[in-house]
Image (spheres, grey):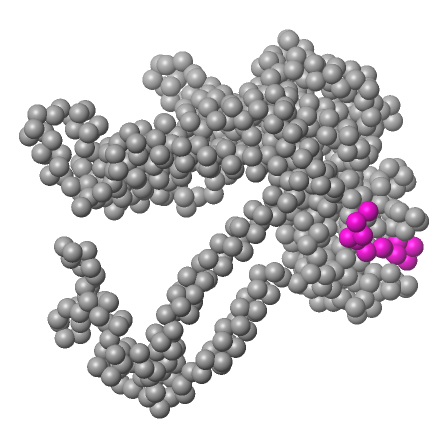
Amino acid sequence: MTESSRSDGENAAESESGGTVDATDREMAAPDDGVATTDREVATDGGTASGIDARVSDLTAFLRDRPRLRTLSIAGPPYGILVFFFAIPLLAMLVVSFQADQIGGAWTLRNYTDFLTSETYLTVVWRTFLLSVQVTAIVAAVGYALAYSIVRFSRRTTLLLLLVILPFWTSYIIRMYAWINILQSDGVLDSILNLVGLPALSLLYTETAVLIGFTYVWLPLAVLPFYASLTNLDADLIEASKDLGAGPIRTFLSVTLPMTINGVITGVVLVFIPTFGSFITPRLLGGTNNVMIGMVIENQFKSAFNWPFGAAIGMVISVVVVALLVLATRLGGGLFGTGGETS
Amino acid sequence: MRKVTDGSTSLKRRRFLQGAATTGAAAAAGCLGGGGGGSDRVPMDVTEWPPEDLESNLNLWNWYDSWAEYAIDAFGEEFDVDVSNSGYSSADQWYSQLQAGNDEIDNIAATTNWVERSIENDFLHEIPVDVMPAWDNITDRIKEASSYQQDGSVYGVPESLVLYPLTYNDEYFDSAPDSWGVLWDEEHEGNLCMWDNATVSCQIAALYTGQDPIQPDDYDEIEEVLIQQKPLLQTYWGDYQQGMSLFVNEDVVAGPLTMGRTYTARFQEGAPVHYTAPQEGAMYTSDLFVIPQGAPNPIASLQFTNWASETENAAQLFETMGYQPAVDISDELSEEDAEFTNWPDEWDLVFSETLSDEVRSRYDEIWTAVKAA
């Protein structure tokens, strides 16, 4: 079966006879109209339905009579997974964050007061924020340009997208070690620079190395939503903008960017959040001045054994990051209108 | 909507809900896992050696990966036991499993301070060392140093000694540096490193400033000297491989590195490195074999612990990883290896006792402040 998107936005599908039947109609059709039993009748061998097919049909029919149960059976598992693997651990972390010294300790607010009144920790948070903003800005700029190029100037989009996501097939740690080899003194980069007669940079263990590492790691996460939003952009709108006298920059700022802002915001979220919590990249590529709050949290759990304090820092950071993103999203929407509506 | 009744069994509401409930319960059980599984037998049931009726499986958690590979084959073949190993990088990985109720791990190579915590929380089986022949192989030095007993009961068998020495480039230096002060010497600016580890780095600073690294009396001085040191360093290494690579690539000439990694760098990577314990002293700890409560194969684990403490098997720990085994293996080593493992009597070695919560917390605060400075 091939599905096509109709102008009214409803899904239609080719029936076995070649005509079109609305998906909704097929779902809601009465069993005795010959549609509901299609699944069983159209067995792969064209013969009788198997026992499993019969049971599936019975189950489908049973659920059809009970819309609330059907909704629960469809939505329940993913919500259950979210609750079990996300909400409950988060709640557990919240509870632990109010305990003193160790899990099961006395109830206290000290973990929060210690963190929020410490100039050291707040300095680390501020630095982490600045670095995350830098990384997000770089990734957004590079990623948007890359996605735009793929959509507008290339026919080999599948191949190019494959190349974009290819790094995901390699372990994060291995990729970081690759960058160590590239950026270290007399490494790949320095060797190439020497070949062309330029001085060596020895970028490893600098903030630049951290920025390069983060940009490389998160770029695919940003490119994919950018690409998705740019694909949905109607090229006629750009042409219309030009016809009305707008230059490339004006067209980009008044048409392209507002129409793809939802994809941009998604990409920004996907980059900003993991950067804020990162600890491996700055540890491997950064020098002595690249401590991030993720490293502090990791240390509380793995070295200091102060899980409650680590949990408290984690909770504060979670709240801060979510608040920042909500603010940025609203600000983004305010700057560029509703954005992303292609109707 | 009408129910389809095509001759097949119609699905009754109650039956459907029962099935759903059963599936849900099974899924929940699968997710939650079982806590506190294990065998009916415990190691202390063994009163004569060798123990009889070994289980057919053994699940190790040993972070000496290369040695574990040797052990899987050698022990498995000798005792007809199917051995597996889960290498780990951080002790909290197995400790959290013990907290949750172990039903998987049979034998862990655990660092002393984590062993102490495990003993305090009753996570470990007592071990009948009196009936284990290989117990006599463990050197007195490590028997006296390690913390593996409580109220006369033994909960671990020492596996190795882990020294935190000063590693240095022996082509750059004419002789071994005799002080931690080399890490504060401006002459070597940009060619030094420190370990991104609050305890290790603060203890080095404590030794450098003449303080007791277990119970220092001037935290401000420790923080001050670590901040002073910062501009001289190339980086704080956080990963053992990264630390070793700094010396192999000759990016640094001196800094803290474990003895095992120094051995690997010297003999397997050909790097011009050696190690020493400066005159102010150096810290060392030990790793021990422990058998956690809930171990499904405790008797096989006990047999393994004894087997691993036999001289030839302990010697393999050094041959493969470069760490000093808890057993005297001097007769098994080449002259070069024997020289490398020799810790001169004049070295002032301080056993890394478990720090008090206050000291650990202060070290952690200092280290965060130093890195943020």
Q: Is residue A150 visible?
A: no
Name the outermost residue toward the bottom: B7
Question: In the image, is residue A7 above or below residue B261?
Answer: below
**Residue at x 70% of width, y 14% of height:** B225
Q: Nearer the viewer, residue B261 or A55?
A: A55
Residue name at image x 54 percent, y 66 percent = B27
Q: Is residue B123 magenta?
A: yes
Q: Main secondary structure of the magenta part?
A: loop
| Residue occupying the point 46% across, 37% down | A322
Residue B99 to residue B46: above or below: above
User: Along the horizontal axis of the image, is A45 left or right of A167?
Assistant: left
> Which x, y percent locates residue B263?
68, 33
Q: Which one is nearer the viewer's eye here, A192 or B148?
A: B148
Looking at the image, which is closer to me, B20 or B248? Answer: B20
The magenta stretch spans residue B251: no
- Image position of A214 (left or right of A26): right
| Residue B70 vertical placement versus A58 (above, below) | above
Residue B284 location in percent, x, y? Answer: 78, 32
Which of the 4 image quadrants contains residue B366? top right
Would residue B143 be visible to someone looking at this image? yes
Q: Residue at x 16, y 28 (%)?
A: A251
> Magenta stretch?
B120-133
Q: Which quadrant would residue B286 be assigned to in this image? A: top right
